[in-house]
Amino acid sequence: MDTRFSASDWHQGLEDDWQAILALAFREDLGQAGDLTTDALVPPDAPGRAAVVARRAGVAAGTPGVTLTLERFDPELRWRPECRDGDRLHPGRRLGIIEGPARAILSAERILLNFLGRLSGIATLTRRYVEAVEGTRARIYDTRKTTPGWRRLEKYAVRCGGGENHRMGLYDAVLIKDNHLALGAAPPESGGSAADPAKSGPGKYGPAEAIAHAKRYVAKLAKKGGVSRSRSAKSGTARSGGPAVVEIEVDTLDQLDAVLPAGPDGVLLDNFSVANLRAAVTWRDSVAPSVFLEASGGVNLDTVREIALTGIDRISVGALSHSAAWLDLGLDWL
């Protein structure tokens, strides 16, 4: 039933993003003068050994990037991990131990904890949503509401929490929304206004017609070796596997009835009530069981279970990335 978008695992693309953000973090924290406090008070030859420790319960994410961070400060720093991404953390559990020059450990502390706290916070919140829908068919998905520059890392953190990734960007899937229908002019080969009785206006695509045109477009791209629905987890680059996913957003049950015969891969049900979600699932099961249904809007930890019990396939939650509280982590000397 579920036609998935690509999923994030740790790969070279994530390392590249980590390094790019790290360069900015290094510049904003150390500037041209470096760590004035540490340089003034700590002898240059002082050895250090410290643990990264969870202050609160949560889920670890971002630990493969610790070594990248430490190397930026001093190649003599060593990281000994004591957990893996996706592991549960309890207060006092160590994520790992850092050994090496004490000055470098102190200078790296805040930047390192910023990365780990942000990503572990996303993984922690995601795990809460995933656990809330256990026993249902629903899967928890993220959105593109991510911090600019952090998208692949934040979506990786969602995976660490047990969630799934929606499209990575505009480049790897089609999601037709009202604004696309309002502005897209129907080309002559589409059959004109007679091709779709649900036209949104003269010379505009109706929902069913937009699906048909989008499917033709991505099929052509796939034949030319362009974007496809399968992606390499290691590199994040597209590989063969059929045309990219075509999904359309609808606001009412009547719109759902109009688009299902057009054969989209999925339909996003925007701000549907629980009763309408249940009706949508029943209707989809009877006329187009291969189409996945995704619920969006009004989703929080208080409502997600009830939404999942309607039989919906996917629930997209922007809060996973835009509203996750950082996980409280600290650095303790050993």
Image: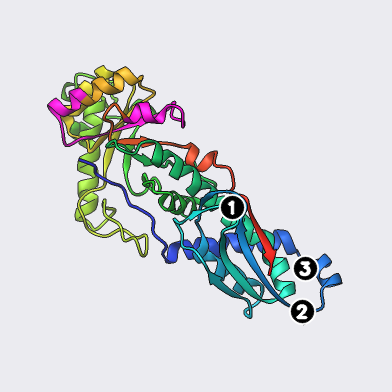
Q: Amino acid at mark 2?
A: Ala
Residue 33 position within the rendered picture, expressed as x and y whole percent measured from the top left:
80, 68
Instruction: Tell me the SS state at disc 3.
Output: loop
Kindly indicate the quadrant of the structure image that contains residue 204.
top left
Q: Which is more N-terminal, label 3 or label 1? A: 3
Q: Nearer the viewer, mark 3 or mark 2?
A: 2
Residue nearest the viewer, comparing 82 with 275 = 82
Return the residue at label 1. 91
Residue 24: tell me if it is visible: no
Identify residue type, mark 3. Gly
- For the residues carrying marks 1 and 2, which lies nearer the camera in this image? 1
Disc number placed over residue 46 in the picture, else none: 2
Percent coordinates x, y for residue 158 in the rendering: 44, 48
| Kind of residue at disc 1 | Pro
Residue drawn at x 39%, y 41% is 130
Residue found 31% across the figure and 61% down from its top: 232
Residue position marked by numbered label 3 in the rendering: 34
